[in-house]
């Protein structure tokens, strides 16, 4: 704790003042990057990584006062075994809860998984994901409060009010615990996307439906994150998920724990880890355009192994709108994904192999005078999900019928595997526009095996919630030939 306190002092007294001297008027909140290669989540290794994380960021006591009620917003998107890497690992949550309880906090673990939000379902998900054990071993509580309320969100851009969990308001502090995963629609499930789980159950579908374009949805996710206001965000990237995340992808050993008070900067760092161009991740792109984080991960401050690494670029970034950060910011995406004034366009980049992220090129550009603090954790060939391809005709004056035709030819779409589907109806119940049809028997849960669901692609918004929530991994994503061709350009 003493070392952490000293480091924090050094950060404020040295780097922040130096940063301000270079023209920055904002508060730079550092990113901690700690290695952990215990792929089986051995308790002592995970706990050591988390203790180092807190030490890097100034110690537990800089976040927690004795008696604080802390809500750990974990990722329990669905009932999945921890080994699948789709949900928060119970050992990670247990070790974190142990540290916080040791610091005097009262800890509650919770999330709103996809689908209905009720006590029965929560019990089932907690059990299936190993959270019951994590709570029992650490002395934390599991959240069974399924209440929610509409709240004002003055810092929001498009969501000036929204509905989220009452459990947030019963807590003094919220800590955001996500897992490093890909996401079919949003490309990355990092710190910002994780806070979508503060919206209760099936209401999430409504938020999706009202904002079908990735950048509009990204604005909503950012607003939801600002509203929940986590004091600390932690991304478990020990074993991440690549490919068809956030639930049907493949576990990938990465070996890093990232943490910061700044969820937007943290996602920018996560983009570096998976070797993705920041602006190809909608939440990161909109955070940049809303001046919530810099354009480049090299502009962040890092703490690694107790060593503080300042921004690479000595030139002050354009932070003119930064003061608006907590008061709400710049322009909404609103279907017109133009960069905000002052932000630069993404540079043209070389082609990429299909199934890979567009390479951020960090390794070539780091330069001799600055050591990339994330390089040792970065996975150059991290597999990307099948993501929605932006229709090149969208927003143009081309007649709607042609735009829709291009959309049909160019967009990946969900498919259903009859050999794996058990007819549970979860996909149909949670499809935001109600584009999936099943027999009524299947929706009533009276049949063990039903017809394979069918989707009306003219109504499908390609959110891939169906894939996310299918308990049998029976939902695949088909890429039309045009998509495959364009994806290689
Ligand atoms: S595709 Fe998956 S979610 Fe949909 S009915 Fe079949 S098993 Fe259930
Ligand atoms: S069919 Fe699947 S991808 Fe399409 S809108 Fe419904 S849940 Fe989203």
Image (cartoon, grey):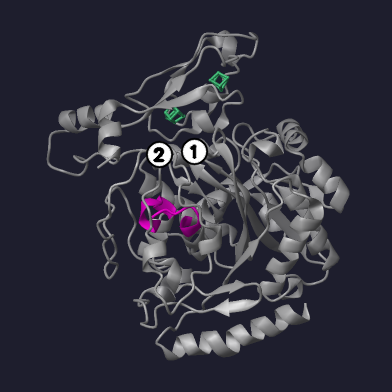
Does 186 appear in magenta? no
Q: Quadrant of residue 131?
A: top right
Give the image location of residue 205, x and y in percent.
50, 36
Helix, strand or loop at label 2? It is loop
Answer yes or no: is residue 153 visible: no
The N terminus, quarter of image: bottom right
Label whose residue precedes the other's in the sequence (2 or 1)? 1
Which numbered dot is residue 355?
Answer: 2
> Residue at point 32% right, 61% down?
331
Q: What's the magenta region?
A: 271-283
Q: Is residue 342 left or right of residue 221?
A: left
Identify the residue under disc 1.
243
* Residue neighbourhood size for the residue with mark 2, other residues' Cα within 10 Å, grouped as few (<14), some (14–19), many (≥20): some
Give the camera-side residue of 208 and 14: 14
- The extreme front residue here reads 368
Answer yes or no: is residue 40 visible: yes
> Ligand 1: which quarter?
top right
Question: Assess mark 1: CB under 8 A from ligand 2?
Answer: no
Q: Pointer 2 and pointer 1: residues touching (CB < 8 Å)?
A: yes
Q: Is residue 135 left or right of residue 298?
A: right
Give the camera-side residue of 372 and 418: 372
């Amino acid at each position: 704790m003493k070392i952490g306190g000293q480091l924090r002092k050094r950060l404020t007294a040295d780097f922040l003042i130096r940063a301000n001297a270079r023209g920055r008027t904002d508060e730079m909140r550092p990113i901690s990057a700690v290695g952990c290669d215990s792929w089986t989540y051995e308790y002592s290794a995970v706990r050591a990584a988390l203790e180092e994380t807190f030490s890097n960021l100034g110690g537990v006591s800089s976040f927690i006062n004795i008696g604080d009620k802390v809500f750990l917003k974990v990722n329990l998107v669905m009932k999945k075994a921890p080994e699948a890497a789709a949900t928060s690992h119970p050992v990670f949550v247990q070790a974190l809860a142990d540290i916080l309880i040791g610091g005097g906090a009262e800890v509650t673990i919770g999330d709103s998984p996809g689908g209905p939000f009720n006590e029965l379902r929560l019990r089932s998900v907690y059990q299936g994901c190993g959270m019951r054990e994590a709570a029992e071993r650490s002395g934390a509580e599991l959240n069974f409060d399924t209440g929610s309320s509409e709240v004002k969100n003055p810092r929001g851009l498009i969501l000036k009010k929204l509905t989220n969990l009452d459990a947030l308001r019963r807590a003094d502090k919220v800590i955001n615990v996500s897992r490093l995963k890909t996401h079919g629609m949003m490309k990355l499930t990092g710190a910002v996307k994780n806070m979508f789980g503060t919206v209760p159950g099936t209401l999430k579908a409504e938020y999706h439906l009202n904002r079908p374009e990735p950048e509009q949805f990204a604005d909503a996710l950012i607003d939801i994150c600002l509203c929940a206001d986590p004091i600390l965000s932690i991304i478990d990237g020990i074993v991440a998920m690549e490919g068809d995340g956030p639930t049907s992808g493949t576990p990938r050993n990465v070996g890093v724990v990232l943490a910061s008070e700044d969820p937007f900067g943290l996602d920018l760092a996560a983009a570096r880890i998976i070797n993705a161009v920041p602006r190809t991740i909608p939440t990161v792109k909109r955070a940049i355009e809303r001046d919530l984080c810099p354009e480049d991960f090299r502009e962040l401050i890092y703490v690694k192994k107790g060593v503080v690494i300042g921004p690479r670029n000595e030139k002050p970034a354009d932070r003119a709108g930064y003061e608006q950060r907590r008061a709400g910011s710049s322009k909404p995406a609103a279907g017109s994904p133009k960069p905000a004034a002052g932000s630069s366009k993404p540079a043209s980049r070389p082609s990429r192999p299909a199934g890979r992220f567009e390479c951020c090129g960090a390794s070539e550009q780091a330069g001799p005078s600055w050591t990339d603090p994330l390089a040792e954790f970065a996975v150059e060939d991290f597999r990307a999900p099948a993501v929605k391809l932006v229709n090149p005709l969208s927003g143009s004056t081309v007649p709607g019928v042609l735009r829709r035709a291009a959309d049909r030819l160019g967009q990946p779409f969900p498919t259903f595997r009859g050999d794996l589907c058990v007819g549970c109806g979860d996909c149909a119940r949670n499809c935001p526009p109600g584009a999936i049809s099943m027999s009524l028997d299947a929706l009533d849960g009276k049949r063990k095996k039903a017809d394979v669901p069918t989707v009306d692609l003219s109504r499908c918004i390609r959110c891939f919630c169906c894939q996310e929530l299918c308990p049998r991994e029976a939902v695949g994503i088909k890429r039309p030939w045009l998509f495959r061709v364009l994806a290689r350009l």
